[in-house]
Amino acid sequence: MAKKTKIGLYGIGLDTYWSQFPGLRERLEGYLGYVAKRLQTNGTKVVNAGLIDNPEKARKAGEFFHSENVDAVFLYVSTYALSHTVLPVAQKANVPIIVLNLQPVAAIDYKKFNALGDRGKMTGEWLAHCQACSVPEIAHVFNNAGIPYDIVTGWLEEEYVWEELYSWVQALKVRSMLKDTRVGILGHYYCGMLDVYTDVTSAASVFGCHFEILEMDLLKLYRDQVKDCDIEKKIQQFEREFSVDPECDSQELHRAAKTSCALDRLVSEKKLGALAYYYEGTEGNPHEEIVTSVIAGNTLLTAHNVPVAGECEVKNVLAMKMLDLFGAGGSFAEFYAMDFNEDVVFWGHDGPAHAKIAEGEVGLVPLPVYHGKPGKGLSIQMSVKHGPVTLLAYVQGPGGSSFLLVAEGESVSGETLQMGNTNSRYKFPLSARDFTNAWAKAGPAHHSAIGIGHIGDSIEKLAKLLGIECRRIC
């Protein structure tokens, strides 16, 4: 079970105000309590340090957040406050800061405010709505101190605000789970795909995950130990989760089921959260029996939160994992073709797919030849669910740079290629021609992960938390 995301929360105020404006502090603490209650959702723990109004309390709050090992600190600006109540917290907590510039309401009731008459009361009422006053000061200090932060501006019950805050919480959760992910690398790269070769050290530095180099011999050992009863259960799972083509040979089903059982054990024994693989070997090598029968099992793993990428596409399996953690799926894909008459691009791939984001049934079909790869066997035929989609690539660019490349579009209905592969038709705000040029010029590998829904904003937040750029094509 995934650990809860832990959010540090505190408000800032100015202790000079409390004696001047009775009741102001209690009112502002009430607003802070409202924020804490709404942040306390499933999978989120809120560590509330209360209203901080002087530097001594700020230092203690920072130490408190550090000891609680919070994933981020949400700073609620309750009224004007001095920046010396902010900097010590950020320095000691040493985690990303989200500044909550949230008024109590969308606008002050001007008539009611002016009817107060007493300018002292009017000042106290104004201070309860004076959140924005401190924000430039806070930003100035964070900029000069090199402290990462972001700002959410709005009012307490505004729907936009809570969509933003929950999106930040989700991005923090994904970042945390990425750090805990063990990524298996099985076999070797597809020779000559220079774009696919990955700097694993750089990837580990960006995401904090662990990479486990795996031997095909180990998978063969596990496969040799599979029992007949487990193979029968696996074939039953194929029949539950796939539409098994009647032309699938029983020997091929048996072969794929046996390999799927071995893959399950490999994932379990090595505690894998993702897997990239490819292997060829020499003709007649016993490992050929394995590598030509992995597609069905790898598709099952992908559908059950362990994404698998073929052609040893390590960068893309990380993109698939990110989409899966966001609940968007994450299927393995590449450019297939363009239809200039209908202004759509086709994306798809042979090999593993994310069955839970399919439009209709997921076909398990025979393939007489794996193009560009040895052997033949079973393959997956499906299209991605019609509606909004997000494409994601993790790019290792020039000069050791890393960034996430994102595009939002639509999976649309229409004719697709029934060739034993996964392929779908996609439309984007750009024309098919302009989208293809823009995506390619960003310099990703030729593979991409595709998920359902428009989650570019959440991915952008994740990139900020990871300390890398997010480039959005559309």
Image: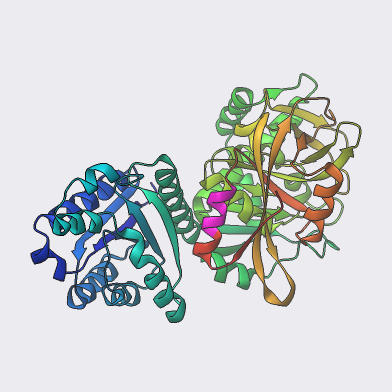
The answer to whether residue 208 is seen in the rendering is yes
Query: As drawn, is 91 to the left or to the right of 50?
Result: right
Give the vertical position of 140 relative to 349 (above or below): below
Give whichever of 111, 303 is nearer the camera: 111
Question: Quadrant of residue 206 in the image?
Answer: bottom right
In the orientation shown, which residue stands out farthest toward the top?
Answer: 246
Q: Is residue 139 magenta?
A: no
Q: Position of residue 329 (x, y in %)?
A: 59, 40
Give whichever of 240, 179 is nearer the camera: 179
Give whichever of 365, 95 is nearer the camera: 95
Give the vertical position of 382 relative to 473 (above or below): above
Q: Position of residue 22 (x, y in %)?
A: 8, 58
In the orientation shown, which residue stands out farthest toward the right?
Answer: 341
Give the vertical position of 366 relative to 436 (above or below): above
Question: Quadrant of residue 460 in the image?
Answer: bottom right
Q: Main secondary structure of the magenta part?
A: helix
State the residue at coordinates (41%, 40%).
159
Question: Quadrant of residue 366 in the image?
Answer: top right
The answer to whether residue 109 is seen in the rendering is no
Please report the bounds of the magenta region as a residue range.
456-462
State the residue at coordinates (18%, 73%).
57
Q: Is residue 458 magenta?
A: yes
Q: Position of residue 462 (x, y in %)?
A: 52, 57
Q: How is the image coloured?
A: rainbow
Q: Position of residue 448 (x, y in %)?
A: 72, 50
State the residue at coordinates (75%, 22%).
245
